[in-house]
Structure formats: C-alpha cells, structure tokens
Amino acid sequence: MVRIRRMTDADVDTVAEIRVAGWREAYRGLVPDAYLDAMDPTADAATHRARRAAAESPAVELVAESPADGVTGWVCLGPCRDTDLPAPAGELYALYVRPALIGTGVGRALCAAALESARERGDARLGLWVLRENARARRFYARAGFAADGAERVDPVDGEPLREVRYVRGL
C-alpha cells in the first residue's frame, strides 16, 4: 500500500538519498561515472533545504510512503520552464523511486499524483525532459500517456553533452 502526501522538511534527507541512488541506477552508462560517484546525499540535502527555505517556490513536491518502507519515492513539478509550450503548462521536474522498488507501482502512483496536482494547478498539459538514451524512463512515461513532441536539447553534465527529449501529455 503506497500513500502519497506532500513532502515536509523532515523528508529532505531521505529524498536526497533516493535522488542520488536513482541517478546512479538510472544513469550509469549514460552519465559520466565520475559525476555519479561524486554525488553526495548530504550535499544534495543541503541544497534542497536551501531551496525550500528560499522565497516561496511554486514547485509541488510529493513523496510516496509505505508502512513497511517509509518514504519510497519523490516527485517534483511546477510551472513549465519552456516558453514554446502553450500555456497553461506545467513541468514534471523530477520523479525518483528507491531503485529496489522500481516496477512495484510506486512510480506510477507518484506520476498519477503529479498529474492530479497539475490539473489542480490549472495546467492543460504537462511536459518533462528525459535523456534520449534512457529507454526505461521513456517507456514509463509513454505508458503514463506522455509522448515525445520532437523538442530536443543538450544538457552538459561533467563536460559530456547529454541529449534530452521532451515528452508532453494533455491533462
């Protein structure tokens, strides 16, 4: 049984651990190993705390939790940063699940909650960016009703150009 709720400050350390583990699991072989190995959950948590303490952010952060495993995943969404998507549009900034729980429905529950939150915000569509070579994530988002819209960008990570494709879904 997975319950979705708003993230609290008490969740920041666990979310940082999930995010770093998620990057290492999902992006090994796609992102330079040195970058992944240098990721630090403590530093990630400090950065996340600073962002949360800054001026009020329009981002919505949700966590999945279960009685047996505690917090098992995190999703973050907010206003779309792409000016070429017709308004009103939101953007799914991040979705991560504990690697051991991938395929158990946690990600689907988080995605469904993000879609509902975007509808509540008044968004007509939700976009996201995914690494072009991340086939598992692309399949996940396609099953959730997202489709590549032809937009691409290059995001350099540790000096390596990483190609991303945009997926969009109507709400």
Image (cartoon, grey):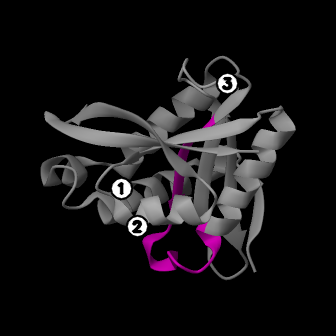
Mark sitting on residue 57: 3
Q: Is residue 44 above or below residue 56?
A: below
The residue wearing badge 2 is 136
Which comes before the other along the chain, label 1 or label 3?
A: 1
Report if the CB atoms under discs 3 and 2 are less than 8 Å apart. Answer: no
Front position in the image: 86 or 68: 86
Is residue 161 highlighted in magenta?
no
Residue at the image point whose x is 63% and y is 76% from the top: 105
Image position of 141 (left or right of 109): left
Give the SS element for disc 3. loop
**What is the crowding at mark 1: few (fewer than 14 residues within 10 Å), some, or many (at least 20)?**
some
Q: Residues in magenta? A: 91-107
**What is the crowding at mark 3: few (fewer than 14 residues within 10 Å), some, or many (at least 20)?**
few
Residue at the image point whose x is 58% and y is 39% from the top: 127
Q: Position of residue 168 (x, y in %)?
A: 58, 43
Q: Position of residue 137 (x, y in %)?
A: 44, 61
The residue wearing badge 1 is 23
What's the CA distance linking mark 1 and mark 3? 24 Å
Q: Amino acid at mark 2?
A: Arg
Image position of 13 (left or right of 152): right
Front disc: 3 or 2? 2
